[in-house]
């Protein structure tokens, strides 16, 4: 690879990300340098398409100029492009045009899948003037609008939009190249970025161009990125970390190799091949990636050799980050050149643009706390965080807690977003946290819990405030983060349960565990043994009594687009009778009360809640069974698809 000796890491320092692009494009060494490389779902041996810095700058200028013919600076536009270089060009083109971008994963234009509800949410909240999409997608939208059976409300919203075909405006138009620059200023809103939805309905976060630029400049320094860096990313490009690395590429003058999330999920080995073939130095992945690749990576099955010697930053996002999972990954891939010092556990959230911190140091082994790796180092002598102030605060008193005490993580930084669109009260509550009896800038209340440990003041992100399971027994309170329960439950039977597909939460002062199965097991005895194993495993590993274990079909536990478990949504589905339940076992002391969850036999079959409520196409019943000195109440729910017809009287 070429050395770019004329690069000074302190220059150029631009107020918005878009202004970096013409600087690189004007330098002879960078104009023909690849900025983005797109690889399709197949082999990583050949790049499907490439955008150099010069090509990207020309395309962005053309898109911006032509968008400002039908639109005005400051208008909101929804971007409905599939992952790829076209989406990259569109995002940067909108920033240069001074438009407010709302990137949304485009739902199937037939609108038969439930994922189109997020589009309706975005349209109703942001009220965009136009929608940008590929011409073929627009044609299918117009076909849907013409159908008499279409959703009238959705049709009305789609008809109110001006539809602009990206493939018609991204071609360079030399007559428009010299129009005045009308891009976003630092104080201008340039992006509506939705939260992941891990703890509630996704909320629209307002991001200024200046906040985004500060955020990626901070990340560039933290990860030591530069023009010789090569980034590999399969993350969704619509928001959060996937979008940030598009901006980070331009700020760093680096090269970014992209592929789709679907390509990675279908063939996890592709990620390893991209790192190997492009000599990647940096890659961001959610924490679930590591165990998934260990299990399904197929290192020995492909024809392309795996070599990870070039990796400097294997950035792990999506807390919590378990030390055991990281060590297992390192042990497997160390023979393939992976350097353990490349592991970069990190922390971020949409409300702070994305990046908050990383614990990575190339020469420092990472400690652990309660099975977790740290996501920051808050040593006061460390200049990594610059003007980003992170404190751990008592949620009730708003006082900073001492090191070693868990509390809510608060962040004060120029990277903080401007608030939530059309949510003034929530914006005031979340973005204007004030420490008690202290004068300071306002803090962003992250909703995450953490603890600071050790002389280097490592920050460990322990979980989400909203997800904490709180139980009371004889006026004695107990708190536990659900991910510990879920991990222990999975460890009880990893051959049957799906890793990363369990949800633990509280119902009626009882811990409930919902777990997806890897296969449709028909043996009642096996299912019962799995439930007993979950209960026993959680007690032994975490000292927590599980009141109910629910085994469900694959795909029933709801997740965000970045793979986070939506425990609130899982609880709603279970209580609402919309889970594809294979077996539900409720444990309780003899004579004790057992909560009624109203679990359903399936999303399509449905039934009334309550004990013995009939209907829905499944067979169900209540029984009693003695186990040791305890008696337990069991609810069995069987889907017709499973073809299970047990003699329920055998459980009496």
Image (cartoon, rainbow, N blue to C red):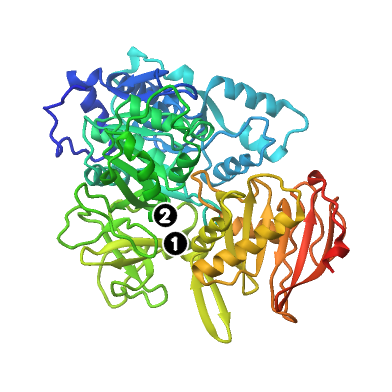
Residue under pointer 2: 319
Question: In the figure, is residue 332 to the left or right of 650?
Answer: left
Q: In the rendering, which numbered label is found on residue 84?
A: none
Callouts 1 and 2 close, C-beta under 8 Å: yes
Going from N to C along the chain, the mark reached first, 1 or 2, is: 2
Q: How far across and down, in percent of the image, does residue 471 sit? A: 56, 76
* Quadrant in the picture for residue 276: top left
Question: In the figure, is residue 156 to the left or right of 457?
Answer: right
- Check disc 2: other Cα within 10 Å, few if <14, some if 14-19, many if 20+: many
Looking at the image, residue 453 lies above or below residue 299: below
Q: Secondary structure at mark 1?
A: strand
**Residue farthest to the bottom?**
474
Position of the C terminus, as image quadrant, is bottom right
The residue nearer to you, when weighing 16 against 129, is: 16
Look at 38% across and 78% down and name the residue there.
Answer: 397
Residue under pointer 1: 463
The residue nearer to you, when weighing 155 against 506, is: 506
The residue nearer to you, when weighing 633 against 501, is: 633
Q: Secondary structure at mark 2?
A: loop
The residue nearer to you, when weighing 617 against 6, is: 617
Question: In the figure, is residue 162 to the left or right of 381?
Answer: right
Position of the N terminus, as image quadrant, is top left
Q: Is residue 446 visible?
A: no
Look at 43% across and 48% down and name the residue there.
Answer: 287
Look at 24% across and 34% down and name the residue there.
Answer: 252
* Marks 1/2: CA–CA distance: 7 Å
- Check disc 1: other Cα within 10 Å, few if <14, some if 14-19, many if 20+: many
Look at 33% across and 37% down and name the residue there.
Answer: 335
Looking at the image, residue 19 lies above or below residue 369: above
Q: How far across and down, in percent of the image, does residue 110 sit? A: 68, 30
Q: How far across and down, in percent of the image, does residue 111 sit? A: 67, 34
């Amino acid at each position: 690879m070429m050395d770019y000796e004329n690069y000074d890491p302190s220059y150029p320092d631009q107020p918005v990300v878009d202004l970096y692009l013409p600087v690189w494009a004007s330098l002879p060494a960078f104009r023909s340098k690849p900025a983005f490389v797109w690889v399709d779902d197949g082999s990583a041996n050949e790049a499907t398409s490439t955008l150099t810095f010069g090509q990207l700058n020309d395309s962005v200028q053309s898109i911006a100029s032509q968008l400002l013919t039908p639109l005005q600076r400051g208008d909101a536009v929804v971007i409905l492009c599939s992952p790829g270089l076209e989406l990259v060009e569109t995002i940067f083109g909108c920033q240069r045009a001074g438009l407010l971008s709302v990137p949304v994963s485009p739902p199937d234009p037939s609108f038969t899948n439930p994922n189109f509800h997020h589009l309706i949410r975005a349209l109703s909240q942001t009220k965009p003037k136009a929608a940008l999409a590929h011409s073929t997608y627009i044609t299918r939208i117009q076909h849907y609008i013409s159908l008499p059976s279409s959703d009238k409300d959705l049709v009305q919203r789609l008809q109110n939009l001006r539809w602009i075909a990206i493939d018609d405006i991204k071609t360079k138009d030399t007559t428009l190249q010299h129009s005045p620059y009308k891009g976003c200023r630092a104080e201008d809103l340039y992006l509506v970025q939705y939260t992941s939805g891990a703890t509630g309905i996704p909320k629209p976060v307002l991001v200024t161009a200046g906040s985004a630029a500060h955020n990626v400049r901070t990340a560039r320094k933290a990860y030591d990125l530069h023009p010789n860096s090569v980034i590999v990313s399969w993350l969704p490009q619509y928001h959060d970390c996937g979008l940030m690395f598009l901006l980070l590429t331009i700020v760093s003058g680096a090269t970014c190799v992209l592929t789709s999330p679907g390509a990675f999920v279908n063939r996890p080995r592709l990620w390893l091949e991209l790192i190997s073939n492009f000599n990647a130095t940096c890659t961001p992945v959610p924490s679930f990636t590591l165990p998934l690749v260990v299990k399904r990576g197929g290192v020995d099955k492909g024809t392309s050799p795996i070599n990870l010697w070039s990796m400097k930053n294997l950035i792990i996002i999506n807390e919590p980050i378990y030390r055991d999972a990281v060590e297992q990954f390192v042990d497997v891939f160390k023979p393939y050149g992976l350097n353990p010092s490349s592991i970069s556990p990190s922390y971020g959230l949409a409300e702070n643009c994305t990046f908050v911190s990383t614990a990575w140091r190339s020469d420092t082994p990472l400690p652990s706390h309660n099975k977790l790796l740290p996501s920051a180092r808050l040593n006061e002598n460390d200049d990594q965080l610059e003007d980003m102030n992170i404190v751990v605060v008592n949620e009730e008193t708003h006082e900073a807690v001492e090191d070693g005490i868990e509390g809510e993580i608060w962040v004060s930084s120029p990277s903080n977003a401007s608030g939530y669109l059309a949510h003034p009260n929530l914006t005031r509550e979340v973005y204007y946290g004030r420490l008690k009896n202290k004068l300071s800038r306002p803090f962003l209340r992250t909703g995450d819990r953490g603890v600071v440990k050790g002389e280097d003041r490592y920050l460990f992100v322990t979980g989400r405030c909203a997800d904490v399971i709180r139980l009371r027994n004889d006026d004695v309170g107990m708190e536990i983060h659900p991910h510990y329960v879920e991990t222990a439950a999975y460890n009880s039977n990893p051959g049957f349960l799906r890793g990363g597909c369990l949800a633990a939460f509280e119902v009626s002062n009882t811990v409930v565990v919902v777990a997806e199965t890897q296969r449709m097991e028909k043996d009642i005895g096996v299912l019962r043994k799995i439930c007993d194993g979950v209960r026993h495993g959680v007690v032994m590993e975490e000292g927590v009594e599980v009141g109910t274990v629910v085994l469900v079909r694959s795909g029933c536990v709801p997740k965000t687009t970045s793979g986070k478990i939506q425990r609130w949504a899982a609880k709603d589905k279970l209580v609402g009778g919309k889970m594809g339940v294979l077996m539900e076992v409720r444990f309780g002391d003899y004579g004790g009360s057992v909560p009624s969850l109203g679990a359903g036999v399936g999303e399509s079959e449905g039934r009334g809640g309550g004990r013995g409520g009939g209907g829905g196409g499944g067979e169900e019943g209540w029984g009693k069974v003695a186990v040791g000195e305890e008696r337990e109440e069991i609810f069995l729910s069987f889907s017709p698809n499973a073809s299970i017809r047990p003699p329920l009287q055998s459980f009496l």
